[in-house]
Image (cartoon, rainbow, N blue to C red):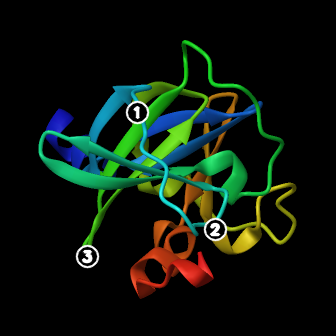
């Protein structure tokens, strides 16, 4: 019976920005790292913090707070870099904290609401209600669309 339930669930990494929780499928998460030194790259948007060399792979690092237009803050002990392996490239996300790995039933995910609040609604794929938690499911394709086009002018 556990196998039957597992087929309807998908694992997500839950992370925090400000007071909201967001989720990304574990299928694209390569690693979660503590903050390490990032090399700034000239002529990139302010939310692209630079690159880091992680196990021989140079990876661009995006501050997700800035990408979403949220208030910036100093990095803390709980801040993390979530390294994603997307179809065309790797990218790292700076987040306030990485909280959990959750199994989220497909039927718990609702479509993107009309009014979302502070995060641009294009970046949201849906919302999951788990117990008393509300998790915002990210549309990574929209979040990283400028990076995929390969033009730092449009980032």
Question: Where is residue 152 shown, x and y percent of the image?
Answer: 52, 77
Q: Residues within 10 Å of mark 3 (few under 14, many from 20)?
A: few
As measured in the structure, the alpha-carbon distance from the residue carrying label 3 to the one carrying label 1 is: 26 Å
Residue at the front extreme, as displayed: 42
As measured in the structure, the alpha-carbon distance from the residue carrying label 1 to the one carrying label 2 is: 21 Å
Q: Tell me if 110 is positioned left or right of 34 in this view.
A: right
Front tag of 3 and 2: 3
Q: Tell me if 94 is positioned left or right of 105 in this view.
A: right
Q: Tell me if 10 is positioned left or right of 100 in this view.
A: left
68 is higher (above) or lower (below) than 3 = below
Any part of residue 60 in sight: yes
> Looking at the image, which residue is at 49% across and 56% down?
107
Front tag of 3 and 1: 3
Q: Which residue is mark 1?
A: 102
> Looking at the image, which residue is at 43% across and 87% down?
149
User: Residue 29 bears which disc, if any?
Assistant: none
SS for callout 3: loop
Of the numbered discs 3 and 1, the one sitting upstream in the chain is: 3
Of the numbered discs 1 and 2, the one sitting upstream in the chain is: 1
Q: Residues within 10 Å of mark 1 (few under 14, many from 20)?
A: some
Q: Which residue is mark 2?
A: 123
SS for callout 2: helix
98 is higher (above) or lower (below) than 104 = above
Q: Which residue is mark 3?
A: 88
Q: Residues within 10 Å of mark 2 (few under 14, many from 20)?
A: some
As measured in the structure, the alpha-carbon distance from the residue carrying label 3 to the one carrying label 2 is: 18 Å
> Looking at the image, which residue is at 55% across and 12% down?
77
SS for callout 1: strand
Question: Where is residue 72 shown, x and y percent of the image?
Answer: 77, 39
């Amino acid at each position: 019976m556990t196998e039957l339930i597992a087929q309807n669930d998908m694992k997500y990494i839950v992370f925090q920005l400000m007071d909201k929780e967001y989720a990304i499928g574990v299928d694209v998460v390569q690693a979660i790292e503590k903050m390490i030194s990032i090399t700034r790259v000239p002529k990139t948007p302010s939310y692209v913090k630079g690159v880091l060399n992680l196990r021989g792979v140079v990876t661009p690092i995006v501050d997700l707070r800035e990408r979403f237009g949220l208030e910036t803050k100093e990095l803390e002990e709980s801040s993390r870099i979530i390294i994603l392996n997307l179809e065309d490239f790797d990218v790292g996300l700076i987040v306030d904290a990485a909280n959990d790995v959750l199994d989220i039933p497909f039927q718990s995910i609702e479509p993107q609401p009309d009014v979302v609040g502070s995060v641009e609604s294009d970046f949201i794929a849906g919302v999951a209600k788990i117990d008393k938690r509300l998790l915002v499911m990210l549309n990574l394709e929209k979040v990283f669309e400028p990076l995929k086009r390969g033009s730092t002018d449009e980032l």
